[in-house]
């Protein structure tokens, strides 16, 4: 029999399309709830570093859309990891896979329920990895999730991680959003 996961997860794919809104360009690929089905999906699709620049993958718990406005996301925020350009070949795919495995493996202990999902943005100015949590006001939960991420990704102090509240990101889109927490 297959190994069931604690949650069902949905993979989304975003590709910029000048004839569609941002939201219409978010496509739901498939959902899975076993470890075997995760690996079949992961091994079947392009890695993040193979995507065209401007594209995203998002993996969220089933029922949560990969956007600020979703009820599960609207009071939350994201731990954001900014990669430099050369990390696309050295770290991007490893970091993204490790984040996926942390989520489906419920690696954040009692705070795993606060995890909504994760996004990888493939961008010319530098790729980004975001882990989205549901409540920006729960400092204990946000910090514990951030600490576990740093540990699992073996991110040293040279790479800073900032936690940005979606409400701040929404209004400051384009310019630098402030970090409510940093690790
Ligand atoms: C419901 N809705 C419209 C809506 N809901 C959302 O949740 C949401 C957006 N729009 N996003 C739009 O993408 C632009 C680039 O953000 P980026 O994170 O790709 O980053 P870059 O600037 O491309 O590096 C954002 O500026 C925003 O326009 C982003 N976003 C998460």
Image (cartoon, helix red, strand yellow):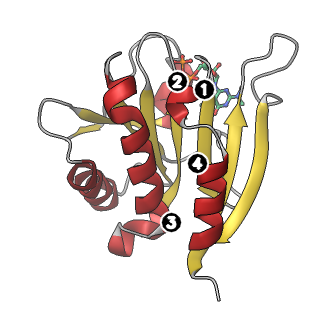
Q: Which residue is mark 3?
A: 104
Q: Disc 1 or disc 4, which is closer to the eye?
A: 1
Please rate how many residues cluster around mark 1, counting C-alpha atoms within 10 Å: few if below 14, some from 14 to 19, many from 20: some
Q: Disc 1 or disc 3, which is closer to the eye?
A: 1
The residue at the point 38 percent across, 15 percent down is 176
Q: Disc 3 or disc 4, which is closer to the eye?
A: 3
| Residues at marks 2 and 3 touching, judged by CB atoms closer than 8 Å | no
Q: Earlier in the sequence, mark 1 or mark 2?
A: 1
Q: Earlier in the sequence, mark 2 or mark 4?
A: 4
What SS does tag 4 mark? loop
Q: Earlier in the sequence, mark 3 or mark 4?
A: 4
Q: Earlier in the sequence, mark 1 or mark 4?
A: 1
Please indicate, yes or no, whether residue 81 appears anywhere in the rendered image: yes
Please rate how many residues cluster around mark 4, counting C-alpha atoms within 10 Å: few if below 14, some from 14 to 19, many from 20: many
- Measured as percent of width and height from the top left, residue 144 is found at 26, 60
Q: Quote the CA–CA distance across marks 2 and 4.
A: 22 Å
Above-or-below relation of 89 to 7: above
Image quarter for ligand 1 equals top right
Q: Quote the CA–CA distance across marks 2 and 3.
A: 22 Å
The image's mark for residue 85 is none
| Residues at marks 1 and 2 touching, judged by CB atoms closer than 8 Å | yes
Please rate how many residues cluster around mark 3, counting C-alpha atoms within 10 Å: few if below 14, some from 14 to 19, many from 20: many
Q: Is mark 4 within 8 Å of ligand 1?
A: yes
Q: Earlier in the sequence, mark 2 or mark 3?
A: 3
The image's mark for residue 51 is 1
What SS does tag 1 mark? loop
Q: Quote the CA–CA distance across marks 1 and 4.
A: 25 Å
| Residues at marks 1 and 4 touching, judged by CB atoms closer than 8 Å | no
What SS does tag 2 mark? loop
Q: Which residue is mark 2?
A: 122
Q: Which residue is mark 4?
A: 73
């Amino acid at each position: 029999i297959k190994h069931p996961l604690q949650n069902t997860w949905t993979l989304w794919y975003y590709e910029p399309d000048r004839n569609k809104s941002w939201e219409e360009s978010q496509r739901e690929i498939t959902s899975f709830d076993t470890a075997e089905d995760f690996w079949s999906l992961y091994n079947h699709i392009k890695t993040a570093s193979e995507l065209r620049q401007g594209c995203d993958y998002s993996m969220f718990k089933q029922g949560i859309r990969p956007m600020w406005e979703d009820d599960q996301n609207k009071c939350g925020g994201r731990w954001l990891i900014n990669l430099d350009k050369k990390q696309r070949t050295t770290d991007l795919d490893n970091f993204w896979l490790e984040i996926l495995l942390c989520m489906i493996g419920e690696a954040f202990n009692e705070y795993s329920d606060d995890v909504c999902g994760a996004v990888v943005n493939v961008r010319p100015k530098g790729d980004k990895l975001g882990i989205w949590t549901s409540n920006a006001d729960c400092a204990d939960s946000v910090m514990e999730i951030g600490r576990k991420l740093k540990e699992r990704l073996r991110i040293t102090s040279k790479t800073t991680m900032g936690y940005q509240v979606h409400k701040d990101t929404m209004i400051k889109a384009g310019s630098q959003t402030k970090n409510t927490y940093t690790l």
